[in-house]
Image (spheres, grey):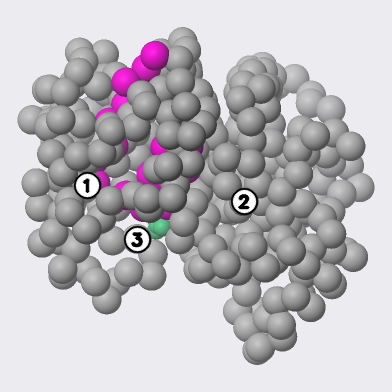
Amino acid sequence: MLDSIISLADLDRPQLWELMELAEQLKQMRARGREVEKRLSGKSVGMLFEKPSTRTRISFEVAVWELGGHPLFLSSKELQLGRGEPLKDTARVLSRYVHCVVARVISHDTLIELDRWSSIPVINALSDVEHPCQALADLLTIREAKGELEGVRAGWIGDGNNVCHSFMLGCALSGISLTVATPAGYEPNRDIVERARALGGDIALTHDPEQAAQGADVLYTDVWVSMGQDAERERRLMDFKGFQLSDELLALASSECIVLHCLPAHRGEEITDAVIEGERSMVFEQAENRLHAQKALLYKLFER
Ligand code: CP
Ligand code: NVA
């Protein structure tokens, strides 16, 4: 039975596989205009956001609505939380009104605290450490493009950040081998690398983007300056030079290589306009898959 998803590794392999299958079915049903069971009927989902969002917010709102539930967007600034009401009080109050909380937080500790004081499931909608819902859509996109996950070779080019962490865990759980290329000082969190490896992940770390691109079936990048890092912008732009996902890097990959980006993208920084608009790019399928993957997640979560 699914419960809170704070990390992608809160899922085991069979649960991940089941979510992928279900997401694909739900996607097909939606495309054919077929009704899905309104499993969230009579249920409300609180969506607590401390940071901006386009994809996560809208795909969750639509997913909840299409499953017959009621999504409530809760900007932290407009709650009493923004005026200093303790999170542990907010968590206990929300637990008496809604049936699940989807939360995008500045600090991962906020999510842990929210989950600790909530008597309902909490879903991580991005923290500074992980973005598990993104990884579900990433894996779904790779599965669609490649027909399978096991044995696929992926390369991450850029920041060893939240999106990278969840992708790494997702690769470990699904048998994708991953080479992560970051500038020195921007490597993924060591604990998460170890966790991914303990799950059986074939994870290599390098400071050479060409090594990650060589022979890859999937190349994935994310912004160099994440939300909340604007003060580091100048330094990051310098440090990430040479890590742009360009046609030159793509030329080193397999001829069938697909390009992923969680979006929003900064063309001319982590990825060129030609690559993101090019024929290998699956970024909009990937964005669409947020909806199907999260719908599957909510569907399984309310299987109780
Ligand atoms: N990829 C992603 O989470 O996008 P948003 O910030 O728009 O939700
Ligand atoms: N790494 C980015 C991802 C946005 C979806 C950020 O945290 O801003």
Which class describes the residues within 10 Å of circle 2: few (<14), some (14-19), or many (20+)? many
Range of magenta residues: 151-169
| Ligand 2 rendered quadrant | bottom left
Q: Label 1 belongs to which residue?
A: 182
State which mark lies toward you, 3 or 1.
1
CB atoms of marks 3 and 2 within 8 Å: no
Does 82 appear above or below 152?
below
Mark positioned earlier in the residue sequence (3 or 1): 1
Residue visible at 70% across and 76% down? 87
**Would you place residue 121 above or below residue 79 in this image?**
above
Q: Is residue 41 above or below residue 299?
A: below
Residue 99 appears in the rendering: yes
Q: CA distance from mark 2 to mark 1?
A: 24 Å
Q: Is 159 part of what is drawn in magenta?
A: yes
Residue 253, relative to residue 67: is it above or below? Answer: above
Residue at label 3? 226
